[in-house]
Image: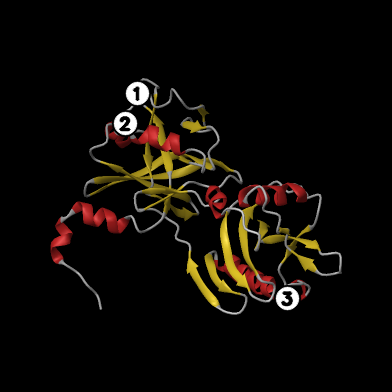
Amino acid sequence: MIRFDPETLTDPRALRTAFGAFMTGVTVVTAQDTRGMPVGFTANSFASVSLDPPFVLVCLANTSSNFDVFANTEKFAINVLSETQIDVSNTFARPVEDRFASVGWQDGPHGSPILDDVSAWFDCAMHQTIDAGDHLILIGEVKGFDHNVAPGLGYARGAYVTPAAEAEALGKRSNMVVSALIERDGKVLLLDNAQGRLTLPMTNDLSSGTGAALKQLISDTGASAEPGFIYSVYEDKARQHQHISFLCKASDGPPSKGVFTELTESTLMGVADPAMCTMLERFAEESRLGNFGVYYGNEVIGEVKPVADGSR
């Protein structure tokens, strides 16, 4: 039964709370003022608009101290923050006299400030501004961009979300197995299990914690990748352990162990663990759709909960 009180439409806090259920990334939007000084603000209302031409958008509150600069600028940049940059987000969200004093940055190829150590950045020419209620929508045409494998910082229900860092919270458990689903360009890093079958990098040595185990798995393969979000959690009753698989994005370069392999039907037939094979079948399908979810359950039955993306 749908429950709705019309009075909540006039309650900004209630509406903000509802919007907050949608998990977003966190960005810092930057530009230069008329004196050539860098300005910026934290925003999670960021979205891609078009690939051809390459357009992005972000929303700016009419009450922002930077409103006049961004409403009249010819260029701006979107900096997608990494999980380690909560302090950067807080700095650019508060009334700090010089927000750039505590961060490293440089001019992007189109002239807007690009922050150091971000997960991705987009240097844009202003394409259009649109008045929208109490916000101004900035639509930019991407003139330059770059990204790396560092996990992005998330935000939901008024709190930061750090999936890779939160792996540490899983603690040390003797009945847990951790695997790394390392992906690059739709291919997955698979290893030989010494019995002529295929497997993901995996370990049950969690003596130093889950996060350390995952980092060690990645390091052992020689792949250039960073820990990502939890992709699948299931109880393997036959083996009497809980299996947690992390989806990790890899950049260019050959691994020292294993091969990045396309998940074809013949490849999946070679996967040693049936439960892992089922998980990889799901990943192959979700890769084609570009829509990922997190699986909770056991090796036989469970539930896939979608991972939200976009902005509010």
Q: Residue furthest front?
A: 174
Which tag is nearer the camera, tag 2 or tag 3? 3
Q: Which mark is residue 34?
A: 1
Q: 28 or 203, which lies in front?
A: 203
- Please identify, in this view, whether the residue under mark 1 or under mark 3 is nearer the observer: 3
Question: Which residue has dot 3 on it?
Answer: 265
Vertical placement of 98 versus 75: above or below? above
Alpha-carbon distance for marks 2 and 3? 54 Å
Q: Residue at x 33, y 55 (%)?
A: 20
Q: Are marks 2 and 3 in contact (CB under 8 Å)?
A: no
Q: Earlier in the sequence, mark 1 or mark 2?
A: 1
Kindly state the secondary structure of the residue where label 1 is placed.
Answer: loop
- In x, y percent, where is residue 156? 38, 53
What residue is rendered at 65% in x and 74% in y?
Answer: 278
Q: Which mark is residue 69?
A: 2
The type of residue carrying mark 3 is Glu
Q: Position of residue 107 (x, y in %)?
A: 51, 28
- Residue 97 seen in the current view: yes
Check disc 3: other Cα within 10 Å, few if <14, some if 14-19, many if 20+.
Answer: few
Q: Residue furthest top?
A: 35
Q: Quadrant of the N terminus?
A: bottom left
Q: Is residue 34 left or right of residue 222?
A: left
